[in-house]
Image: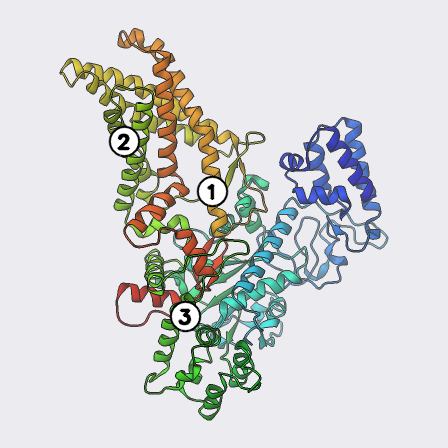
């Protein structure tokens, strides 16, 4: 029985002296699953889960057999589990009460097929027929399903995605007091594929259209009616495409079966199809937002890549119109080169232009969002304001506006408020702020047309939300208020920064990406050199060094040049940013990740360059620059220190990779959480690496003296000198590595120091970004922020640049 399995597992784990967390680390099975199995809240364990646990436990043959027999006993009582108990395994899809997903289950290449249940190898067969070779005769038992090594990863991804977007929906007040009634109709026929392709019909079959009209709460049902599993959602700027994508994800997950892929939102505006294949980009974004999926998966790839390649991820590609104009055609061609089911959102004009250049999205139906009606506004806006009081209980601030709109349904204000984004802005400016009267929107002399009204709402949004007291998390200290003009300046810089990078994603590790490569490298070298030079001066003075100021200056200059050069060669020359790592340090259970060789080479080369330069400088300084004797001393010291530092740096960086492990699968990232996690990883890494590097330098120096004495002549060295050199090297090397070669260090150098120093950002950057998110100016999309709407971003970027005209819409 399942309870018996939990008892056996708990007893064997306790006998081995392992905690649930330690067993999870050894086996790769989540702690939550192990806890559920042992308590009986999770029954019917998968055989792959049992095998992984058995391999991780130090079991004798009889104990292993006992564990397997207990698991098999749980399978005999599969249908007698207590109501409400979570199942660790899914029943075959053919026995499910739920209908098949759109197009059936995903095939190994990610394409759906009409109807059908999955075959033992995971691929569906049309109409639910058994797989080739399976005995379908009555009374013959079907072969057992092949265990799915990705099942746990899929379910944990589904849970993380659902939790993330539920929080985001609450933050955006989408359900407060109720969602705006988004509706759609079938788009123009030339923007959709042939119905025979959409319905996946055989040649010659009649291909009638499907009914596509619907509203927000039916988007998941509409998608499931499409056999191709491909849908394009079109809508003008601010029509609610992103809200619809969010609602699709939540509704799809709420009714998802185990055989269906997990819908994940990707901001496609950040994809460059000319540089990165679609599946690689999807896997990279999945890893960014869920760092634990960088772990090794089946076939030697990452879990993220395995999920994408096997069709376990349903891409919800939001913002096709936000791509650079020259990339839309190759993006559409790349999408058509795959058979991945997907949902794509775009403004109609941009999508139509790409279609005119190449073709429609293959096998995709297309719908277009419609405008809000006066009845929609009358039902929504009055319920967003405060009650007026007992004197006029039925009165409402929006009454005059609604009456005027009914009298003039073709007025500019009616056209503006037909847009959900503008309604949301009007609510923020007038409903949520009692001292603002929406009747001023009726001033025809002040607002001569729709564009003037839209500019007014966009312009009024920031001053309105920044006049309110800053929101604080429960139990947190009150935050300092931000002046609206300062907030506008800083947000304008961020909007302009995203415009230059041609991406909607505001990532903390890319805040310095707005600087050109040369200045960015120069600032990195300067700050790194100054910090290392100061640290070297203080430490040299503390240990009684003869020339601490001179030594600190020499070390600072050389360290700045070396780390600046390494930063240039590693990142700037390719114009890429340092990305947060998806690993943690585990002194037990770490595993090589294929980086030991490259790190050995880079560390050896960097150490040799620094050691050679440092040795030459020290030799010339000690010889008081007397030539040619001083030159001979400089060469000897350069060779000596070059050998010491090259070996120490190469070995220490190589050994560091052996204690790195992937992050936990449940480590779904949000901007501040990812920053804290990466900071902890860097500091832990340095706590291990600095003493290791210092010991290798100090100990290696003594060894090098013995090896080189016969080659270079008499060499003077002492254990005390080795200790001092090791200490200085460990501290200086750790500081340089952190500042120049990690995402957290670049965040400190550029985001926390240089950009605030030059007035482009506030000193408390993280606090400001979180405050803007809580005020509704920014939204979170996984590990990055985005502006609430692309239209707001373009408005702020234009105002920051001081250029006239209007920006592109979405």
Residue 308 picture location, percent across and down? 55, 51
- Which is nearer the N-term, disc 2 or disc 3? 3
State the image coordinates of residue 57 (x, y, percent, origin top left): 70, 31
Q: Earlier in the sequence, mark 2 or mark 1?
A: 2
The residue to which callout 3 is attached is 464
The residues bearing labels 2 and 3 have C-alpha atoms spaced at a distance of 48 Å
Q: Is residue 463 left or right of residue 368?
A: left
Which residue does the numbered mark 2 point to in the structure image?
556
Seen in the image, is 802 located left or right of residue 290?
left
Q: Secondary structure at mark 3?
A: helix
Q: Secondary structure at mark 2?
A: helix
Residue 195 in the image: x percent, y percent? Answer: 56, 72
Q: Is residue 357 visible?
A: no
Marks 1/3: CA–CA distance: 35 Å
The image shows a total of numbered marks equal to 3
Graded by Cα atoms within 10 Å as few (under 14), some (14 to 19) or many (20 or more), the crowding at tag 1 reads many
Residue that appears at 68% across and 60% down: 126
State the mark number for residue 678. Answer: 1
């Amino acid at each position: 029985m399942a309870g018996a399995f939990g008892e056996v597992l708990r007893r064997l784990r306790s006998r081995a002296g392992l905690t649930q967390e330690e067993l999870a680390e050894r086996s790769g099975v989540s702690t939550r699953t192990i806890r559920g199995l042992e308590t009986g809240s999770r029954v019917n364990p998968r055989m792959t889960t049992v095998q992984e646990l058995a391999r991780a436990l130090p079991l004798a043959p009889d104990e292993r057999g006992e564990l397997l027999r207990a698991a098999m006993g749980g399978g005999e009582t599969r249908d007698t589990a207590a109501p409400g108990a979570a199942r660790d395994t899914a029943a075959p899809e053919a026995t499910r009460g739920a209908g098949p997903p759109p197009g059936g289950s995903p095939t190994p290449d990610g394409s759906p097929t009409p109807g059908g249940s999955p075959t033992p190898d995971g691929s569906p067969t049309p109409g639910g027929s058994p797989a080739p070779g399976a005995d379908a005769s009555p009374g013959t038992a079907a072969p057992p399903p092949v265990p799915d090594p990705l099942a746990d990863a899929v379910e944990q991804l589904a849970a993380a995605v659902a939790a993330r977007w539920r929080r985001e929906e609450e933050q955006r007040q989408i359900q407060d007091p109720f969602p705006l009634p988004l509706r759609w109709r079938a788009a123009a026929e030339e923007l959709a594929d042939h119905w025979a392709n959409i319905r996946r019909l055989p040649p010659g079959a009649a291909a009638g259209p499907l009914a596509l009209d619907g509203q927000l709460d039916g988007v998941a049902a509409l998608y499931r009616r499409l056999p191709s599993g491909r849908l394009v959602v079109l809508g003008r700027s601010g029509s609610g495409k992103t809200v619809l994508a969010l609602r699709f994800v939540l509704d799809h997950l709420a009714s998802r079966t185990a055989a269906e892929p997990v819908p994940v939102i990707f901001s496609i505006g950040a994809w460059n199809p000319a540089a990165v294949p679609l599946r690689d980009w999807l896997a990279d974004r999945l890893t960014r937002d869920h760092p634990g999926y960088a772990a090794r998966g089946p076939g030697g790839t990452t879990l993220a890549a395995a999920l994408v390649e096997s069709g376990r991820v349903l891409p919800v590609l939001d913002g096709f119109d936000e791509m650079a104009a020259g990339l839309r055609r190759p993006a559409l061609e790349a999408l058509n080169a795959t058979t991945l089911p997907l949902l794509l959102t775009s403004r109609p004009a941009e999508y139509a232009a790409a279609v005119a250049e190449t073709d429609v999205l293959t096998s995709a139906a297309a719908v277009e969002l419609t405008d809000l009606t006066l009845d929609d506004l009358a039902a929504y806006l009055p319920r967003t304001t405060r009650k007026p009081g007992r004197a006029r209980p039925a009165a409402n601030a929006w009454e005059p506006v609604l009456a005027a709109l009914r009298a003039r349904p073709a007025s500019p204000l009616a056209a503006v408020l037909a847009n959900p984004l503008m309604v949301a802005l009007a609510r923020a400016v007038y409903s949520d702020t009692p001292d603002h009267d929406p009747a001023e929107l009726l001033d025809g002399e002040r607002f001569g047309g729709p564009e003037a009204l839209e500019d007014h709402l966009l312009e009024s949004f920031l001053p309105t939300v920044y006049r309110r007291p800053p929101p604080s998390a429960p139990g947190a200290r009150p935050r300092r208020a931000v002046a609206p003009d300062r907030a506008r300046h800083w947000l304008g810089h961020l909007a302009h920064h995203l415009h230059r990078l041609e991406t909607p994603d505001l990532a903390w590790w890319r805040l310095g990406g707005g600087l050109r490569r040369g200045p960015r490298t120069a600032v990195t070298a300067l700050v790194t050199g100054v910090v290392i030079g100061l640290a070297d001066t203080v430490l040299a003075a503390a240990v009684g060094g003869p020339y601490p100021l001179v030594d600190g200056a020499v070390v600072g200059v050389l360290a700045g040049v070396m780390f600046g050069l390494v930063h240039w060669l590693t990142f700037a020359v390719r114009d890429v940013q340092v990305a947060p790592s998806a690993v943690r340090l585990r002194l037990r259970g770490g595993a090589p990740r294929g980086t030991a060789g490259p790190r050995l080479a880079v560390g050896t080369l960097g150490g040799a360059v620094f050691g050679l330069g440092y040795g030459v400088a020290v030799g010339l300084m000690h010889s008081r620059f007397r030539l040619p004797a001083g030159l001979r001393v400089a060469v000897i010291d350069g060779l000596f220190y070059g050998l010491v530092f090259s070996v120490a740096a190469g070995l220490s960086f190589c050994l560091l990779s052996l204690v790195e492990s992937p992050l936990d699968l449940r480590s779904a990232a949000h901007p501040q959480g990812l920053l804290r996690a990466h900071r902890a990883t860097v500091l832990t890494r340095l706590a291990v690496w600095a003493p290791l590097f210092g010991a290798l330098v100090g100990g290696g120096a003594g060894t090098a003296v013995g090896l080189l004495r016969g080659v270079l002549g008499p060499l003077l060295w002492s254990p005390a000198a080795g200790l001092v050199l090791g200490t200085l090297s460990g501290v200086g090397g750790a500081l340089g590595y952190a500042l120049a070669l990690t995402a957290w260090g670049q965040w400190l150098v550029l985001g926390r120091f240089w950009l605030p120093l030059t007035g482009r950002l506030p000193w408390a950057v993280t606090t400001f970004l979180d405050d803007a998110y809580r005020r509704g100016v920014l939204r979170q999309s996984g590990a990055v922020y985005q502006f609430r709407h692309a239209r707001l971003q373009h408005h702020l970027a234009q105002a920051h640049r001081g250029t006239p005209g209007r920006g592109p819409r979405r």
